[in-house]
Amino acid sequence: MAASTGRGRIGNAAGAGAGAGAAAGGSRAAQSSSKSRSAPASAKKKSGDDLILTIDSDDEVGAAGESEGEMEWQQEGDDNVHPSSSTSTSTRLHSSSQPSLGTSKSKSTLSMKSKVSGNAQGLREGNDGQAWKMDKDFVFDLQGDGYGLGLGYEGKSSGADVRDKGQAGRGLTVDDIIEKRRVKVVLPDDDEEKEKEQEEGQLEQEEEEEHESSDEEAFGAGARRAQRQAQQAGEEGDESEDEEDEEEEDGDEGEGDDDAAESDSSVDEDEQTNETEIDRAKKAAFFAHEEGPDAGGKSSGDPAGASSFSSLNLSRALLRALSTLSYHQPTPIQARAIPVALAGKDIVAGAVTGSGKTAAFIIPVLERLLHRPMTESRSRVLVLLPTRELAVQCAAVGNAIGKFANVNFCLAVGGLSLKAQEKELRSRPEVIIATPGRLIDHLQNSPSFNLDSIEILIMDEADRMLEEGFREELKEIISSCPTKRQSMLFSATMTDSVDELINLGLRRPVRIFVDPKRSTAKNLVQEFVRVRGAAAAASNGEDAEQAQLATLGQGNRRTEETMRPALLLSLCLRTFTHQVIIFVRSKKLAHQLKIIFGLVGLTACELHGDLSQELRLQSLDSFRNGRVDYMIATDLASRGLDIKNVQTVINYDMPNSFDVYLHRVGRTARAGKEGRSVTLVGEQDRKLLKLAIKGSKEENIKHRLVPADHVNIMLEKLDQLKETVREVMSEEKEMRELDIAERELRKGENVEKHREEIMSRPKRTWFQSEKEKNASKDASVADYLSKGEKRKADGTKRGKYDGLSRKQKRSKQMKEEIAKEKSQSSVDASIRAAKKSSRPASLGMPDTSFSKKAQKKDAAAAAAAGKKRRKSKSSSSRKVTGKGAGFAKDLGERSTGRNVSGKKSRGGKR
Ligand SMILES: Nc1ncnc2c1ncn2[C@@H]1O[C@H](COP(=O)(O)OP(=O)(O)OP(=O)(O)O)[C@@H](O)[C@H]1O
């Protein structure tokens, strides 16, 4: 992959999207905090690689600051305080420092432009076509209801987003509040020689101990304990931690982004690798073989095996755009997925993070759209993504690659104006890029909007979309799409479990996995820092009472939760000073850390679901453009975000699942670049640590030592800052209450003014009411926790049916029964079927046996609906209608000009 040449442009593609949407830079926060960072002036920063040991002795780092109580930041916050802006609310225009991709005046970009201006996305192409900039007249929904009580009617908004979350509409921001209270942190002079000696000394000690234990995953002296711990963890299974772990499930139009616990899959990691013969047979029967000139023999991750873009038979319009983006050579996933996608086949694809999966589906989609009949406009492609930021980013990539292709993209995501989106959807854009909740809202409430003409359905981050929280919405969307369509699923942690994929209505999908499952980018160095606290001591069988005392702040030992912020600050003040993403478990913690960072003079923004959409985009933008050095985020940002030059990802804590870990660390070392992740590992994190080590090359795994005296200074400083953090939060709360009062007043005035019009509007209906959504979320969390508790009490492992719906459970049980009874005969039958299905067929031809079956089924459905259908028997050249119908395009075979009717019965479920 021509990674180095491609990078400059590549980052821009994303920047033009996610970042651009928020180009409301120039914030006071940014001004006040940008790069000035006066406080830690005496703290010499060392950006070099000062590896590389584990911190092992809590005695060294736990002795300072005994007088104060223990700080567990996450629990200290006032629940009612919502984070305020991480950047200012000022909407002064800020021109992006990054070069732009959007230089075209082609219809696709113009369309985006017009959509954007009406669509209140805050994205607008400048007159010079050079950059996506913030539209200063940009208006967000007042309540996400699309009817903009007040602001929408007043036309040009007086302010920006006035949604209920995280917004200090009066112009005062949390950064202003912090500014007044900033403190100095003085770390000891970094006498490099001394530090080196110290490290070497400890390294020797560590090595001796490691040698003794010969346990590669262990942290020096903790090796044997770690092993015990890992065993214990294995026995206990993965108990859910009662934390605010979140990833956005987007699309609800209520005030809260429904943050849900991403299901904890860590327990399944080992199981998944133990594929049985039955599983293999099932897969052989379910998946089709990858065929064609570019499919075979391409060893995974081998750029030498990848062909050039021109050898993929792409149109000039695309080749030109790809070359302007400096995409000179397809990445392995692109080389393999593009031909299969062009042939109209279903795809289930997985490749490591940052390997270019977005372009792997965007390029074939655009190529096929280039050959669409121009007689009528219709929405033919639907791309679903789990978060709004990803959708914005995907649209930016689509616009960049399609800038000479004359294709219209429309974003249908939550947090932005419904009304404007409705208007745009009425113009039938060829590609709809959506988050599930908002799409369903449009399906239910936007007159005349439906998905009847969709010919290609793409799910990016598909494994996330298959999880609880999206499942119902996905079902609804899939049932609204025509049965005859091409489906493509992509993710870095894609599953090929037939049981999980079976409900998606895939048609003999081709499985394209180019990297070993669950691997990290090859240029990623993963470091681990040991966190030892009182809790760890207790769990290691040390005196429980003593440990408890320590937890309460009466002993020498600090808890792990107290050690983490101190370790983090030491790392950030001393070593990782630029372009760092810090992942944390909860929104509250993200906000508290952001305040602490501000207080000690580090420039940071936060990104999580408690922020309004505008603030989320602003945060991303300020980080992308280097106005802040740190982005403190929840798992909302763990998937898909492509931010150029992220040097380091720090995991403040290990996520619950290894998949999430892979996505988090995948925010760096993208597109062949180098990157580093640093993970704070507590006693409970041993199992995931083991998995991380198992899947990586030895030389890419390091242990890092944080000097004990630095950590002690930070512990002391954090104790001192505790009160200040409370003050900041309470001032923030007051400010917010004032904002709400003002907003309510404005809202009342507007309701009064526009009463008649408001009353005449049709009532909106919802897929699930807020109440229902919360109830189902609570029920699933309660269910999960109760099972966890029960397992803990029983000492049992997680059950194999846990987390399955009744229907899924029954079907799994039935399959097991059948398998038991006829295990050998069914395996034989499956293998026979698989062999039969794998007989070579020319690329681009749909699977005939399947096709006939499907056509029969569809014909019956259509007849039942009293619809006249096209006769299904067709000449071989017309068989492409089975999939991707309407494009009449095969690989190497240009459009026949035939427009296959897209009329499909909406009810057709697969
Ligand atoms: N052929 C190519 N040549 C050079 N760079 C490329 C090419 N294709 C994609 N890229 C760049 O690689 C980077 C990563 O791409 P992308 O975001 O699509 O990765 P991904 O595989 O979807 O990652 P994730 O799994 O994290 O979502 C982007 O900056 C993109 O512009």
Image (spheres, rainbow, N blue to C red):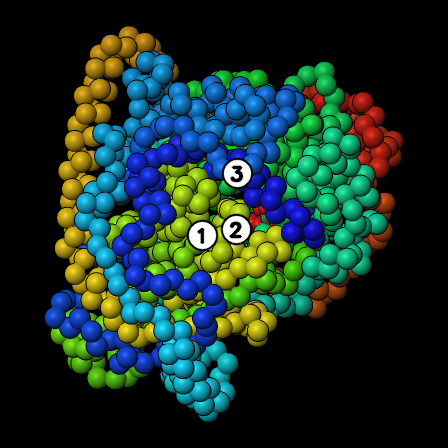
Question: Quick one: 432 or 101, which is closer to the camera?
Answer: 101
The amino acid marked with disc number 2 is Asn
Circle 1 crowding by C-alpha within 10 Å: few under 14, some 14–19, many from 20: many
Question: Quick one: 425 or 318, which is closer to the camera?
Answer: 318
Instruction: Specify whether residue 647 is in view.
Output: yes
Q: Quick check: 110 left or right of 446? A: right
Q: Farthest residue toward the top?
A: 756
The residue under label 2 is: 645
The label shown at residue 98 is: 3
The residue under label 1 is: 579
**Judging from the image, what secondary structure is the residue with disc 2 in?**
loop
Q: Is residue 122 above or below residue 699?
A: above
Q: Quick check: 844 left or right of 810? A: right
Q: Is residue 686 above or below residue 839?
A: below
Residue at point 39% right, 20% down? Answer: 137
Q: Quick check: 428 left or right of 684? A: right
Of pointers 1 and 2, the one earlier in the residue sequence: 1
Could you tell me residue 886's position as x and y percent? 73, 27
Circle 3 crowding by C-alpha within 10 Å: few under 14, some 14–19, many from 20: some
Could you tell me residue 796's position as x and y percent? 39, 72
Question: Quick one: 281 or 440, which is closer to the camera?
Answer: 440
Circle 2 crowding by C-alpha within 10 Å: few under 14, some 14–19, many from 20: many
Of pointers 3 and 1, the one earlier in the residue sequence: 3
Measured in 3D between alpha carbons, the distance from the residue under mark 1 to the one under mark 2, in whole angstroms, is: 7 Å
Of pointers 2 and 3, the one earlier in the residue sequence: 3
**Judging from the image, what secondary structure is the residue with disc 1 in?**
loop
Q: Is residue 620 above or below residue 139?
A: below
